[in-house]
Image (tube, coloured by chain):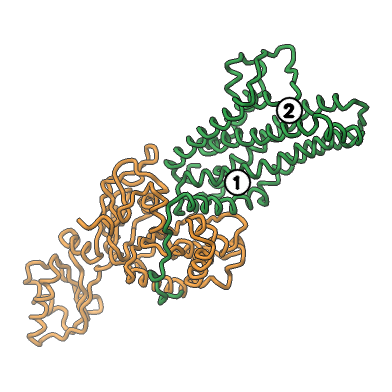
């Protein structure tokens, strides 16, 4: 060890404590987190989840070539998107990605390295959340697009092309992508907080999953305390929720989109407050 | 009281894990230099370190490091580095990536981070292995990369939890020399260690902990001196006529016990006033009847202090 080397000379100072510093710190957190989110062993599960609807659709297309019209395709995709992509892949994918942002680090006993850095913990929350958001949006919007292409273009290419170029296809795709992005924003914030507050985040995740599934049975006021209600309000092809459903007016997009974003901001604020008081005690976790 | 911006101050700090005591009513002022935390397992050493670094929050009391409250990591870790005992790392990173990444998280630019990373790795002699995955490092290398990470941003306060664990003797000696160099440069070093003779060798002061309480603190010899009433100082005098010496010096009022060594070439003396005893001994020796070869305190070190204060409990 070079004991003779000088210790205090040429000490480099971080001079600014400004927004640009926070941006630089968020950038550094993103580099670390995105690498983990996309290339770690934990990410395999998310890839498998994302591949599930694509594989399922491919299988269906192979064994059961449909003979339906493009309008029927739009309904089929709407049901498939809602049940398979939104409620399953995006929900559980976000749960896995966002809960592991902090909980995974606690399990790996590596969270303290972040806590021992000269970074505001709120900035750490922001960096991690954005990394989860980028990961989930890249993966799940890809799934949304690929599944739509599989449903429409695997048969009747010409008719599907017309639907997308001259019909409502592109508009539908835009709204499905918007819903996917909003779902990542909303569920992401929820699961990030769950990962911070709960030692076993699976239980609150399952409670939310159940709540989202029984949403169609809930009275109109309670429906609004959910993510799925606002997302379903944006679906381009209205879904039938069955004979037992309690019908409620869909929330207009100009309310549901900013509403979801405001609630997300509040949830992230709670995460920021929580993390300032958080202790690292791996033994008890 | 020292200037708060130059010291680490514990003001009646307690930490409880539920109903379990971590540390209780700790009031300390730690100046620059090497301060060692000593105590058996579960004494509260790591709790004290985690409190200083904000990884734990005090249940009661107040704690500042160079005037900075420990719940302001964005300010605290510009001045503080912590080499913890957690032998775990973010997965898949090389030594260089590990240090560089967290410097950038702290806000250093890419270039600054790169330069500081190289300096830190050089200092712990890990530069040749910098681009290997940490997962492939030996225990000693992992210890050194943690040390490098804690010193990379050139902190004024360095907290090291068992920093010599896993290091071979050669590297241990070099690391101790490095710590002494840091202390000479005016840094605060707070070190916990189980190896008492190493602590004795490098520390300016010690904090002895047991069951979550500070049992004693200060310079080792100062702590020992305060124990003279309960535990008289033991001194071994190597000489040719120990019996004669015993008869002469036993007239001294503070002598508690004088015993001839088994080889009959020395005398053990227990005294509550060692300074006074040395003066008396000078007078005896000056008379020229007894030839003294050496005089050495037997229990004026950290091991003895530890044994008296903690070992007995």
Viewed as shown, does residue B257 lie left or right of B81?
left
Query: Could one spot residue A210 in this view of the protein?
Result: no
The quadrant where residue B172 appears = bottom left
Residue under label 2: A82
Q: Report x, y in % for residue A68.
A: 91, 26
Q: How many labels does the image show?
A: 2
Question: Which type of secondary structure does the marked residue at label 2 adopt?
Answer: helix
> At 31% across and 54% down in the image, what residue appears?
B209
Q: Chain drawn green, letter?
A: A
Where is A49 relative to B253, above or below?
A: above
Q: Residues within 10 Å of mark 2 (few under 14, many from 20)?
A: some
Q: Report x, y in % for residue B74.
A: 42, 51
The quadrant where residue B175 appears = bottom left
Q: Nearer the viewer, residue B274 or A182?
A: A182
> At 15% across and 70% down in the image, what residue appears?
B274
Query: Could one spot residue A273 in this view of the protein?
Result: yes
Where is B94 relative to A94, above or below?
A: below
Q: Report x, y in % for residue A118.
A: 44, 54
Q: Report x, y in % for residue A221.
A: 58, 16
- Chain B shade: orange
Question: Which type of secondary structure does the marked residue at label 1 adopt?
Answer: helix
Q: Which of B290 and B214 is in front in this view?
A: B214
Marks 1 and 2 in Cβ contact (< 8 Å):
no
> At 67% across and 52% down in the image, what residue appears?
A39
The quadrant where residue A226 appears = top right
Residue under label 1: A131
């Amino acid at each position: 060890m070079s004991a003779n080397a000088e210790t205090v000379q040429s000490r480099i100072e971080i001079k600014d404590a400004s927004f640009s510093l926070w941006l630089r710190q968020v950038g550094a957190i993103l580099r670390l987190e995105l690498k983990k989110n996309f290339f770690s062993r934990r990410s395999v599960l998310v890839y498998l989840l994302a591949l599930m609807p694509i594989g399922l659709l491919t299988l269906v297309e192979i064994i059961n070539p449909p003979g339906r019209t493009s309008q029927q395709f739009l309904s089929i995709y709407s049901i498939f998107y809602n049940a398979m992509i939104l409620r399953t892949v995006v929900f559980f994918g976000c749960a896995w990605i966002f809960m592991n942002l902090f909980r995974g680090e606690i399990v790996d006993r590596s969270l303290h390295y972040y806590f021992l850095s000269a970074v505001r913990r709120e900035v750490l929350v922001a960096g991690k959340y954005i990394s989860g958001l980028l990961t989930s949006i890249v993966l799940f919007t890809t799934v949304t697009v690929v599944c739509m292409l599989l449903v429409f273009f695997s048969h009747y290419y010409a008719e599907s092309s017309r639907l997308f170029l001259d019909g409502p296809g592109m508009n539908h795709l835009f709204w499905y992508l918007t819903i996917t992005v909003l779902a990542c924003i909303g569920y992401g914030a929820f699961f990030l907080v769950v990962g911070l507050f709960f030692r076993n985040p699976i239980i609150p995740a399952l409670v939310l999953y159940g709540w989202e599934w029984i949403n169609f049975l809930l009275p109109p006021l309670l429906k609004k305390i959910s993510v799925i209600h606002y997302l379903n309000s944006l679906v381009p092809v209205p879904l039938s929720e069955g004979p037992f459903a309690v019908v409620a007016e869909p929330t207009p997009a100009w309310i549901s989109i900013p509403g979801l974003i405001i609630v997300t901001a509040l949830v992230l604020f709670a995460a920021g407050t929580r993390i300032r008081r958080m202790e690292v005690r791996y033994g008890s976790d | 009281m020292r200037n708060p911006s130059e010291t680490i101050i514990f003001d009646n700090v307690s930490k409880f894990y539920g109903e379990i005591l971590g540390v209780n009513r700790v009031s300390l002022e730690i100046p620059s230099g090497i301060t060692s935390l000593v105590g058996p397992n579960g004494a509260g050493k790591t709790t004290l370190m985690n409190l200083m670094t904000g990884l734990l929050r005090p249940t009661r009391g107040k704690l500042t490091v160079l005037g900075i409250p420990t719940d302001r990591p964005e300010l605290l870790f510009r001045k503080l580095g912590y080499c913890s005992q957690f032998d775990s790392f973010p997965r898949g990173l090389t030594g260089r990536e590990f240090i560089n990444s967290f410097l950038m998280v702290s806000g250093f630019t890419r270039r600054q981070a790169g330069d500081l990373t190289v300096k830190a790795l050089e200092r712990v002699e890990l530069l040749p292995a910098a681009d290997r995955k940490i997962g492939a490092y030996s225990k000693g290398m992992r210890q050194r990369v943690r040390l490098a990470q804690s010193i990379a941003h050139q902190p004024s306060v360095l907290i090291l939890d068992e920093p010599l664990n896993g290091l071979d003797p050669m590297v241990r000696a070099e690391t101790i020399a490095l710590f002494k160099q840091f202390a000479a440069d005016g840094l605060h070093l707070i070190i916990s260690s189980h190896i008492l003779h190493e602590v004795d060798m490098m520390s300016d002061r010690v904090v002895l902990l047991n069951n979550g309480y500070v049992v004693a603190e200060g310079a080792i010899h100062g702590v020992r001196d305060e124990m003279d009433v309960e535990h008289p100082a033991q001194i071994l005098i190597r000489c040719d006529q120990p019996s004669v010496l015993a008869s002469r010096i036993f007239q001294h009022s503070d002598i508690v016990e004088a015993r001839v060594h088994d080889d009959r070439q020395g005398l053990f003396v227990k005294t509550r006033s060692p300074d006074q005893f040395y003066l008396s001994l000078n007078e005896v020796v000056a008379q020229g009847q007894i030839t003294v070869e050496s005089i050495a305190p037997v229990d004026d070190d950290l091991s003895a202090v530890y044994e008296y204060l903690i070992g007995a409990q």
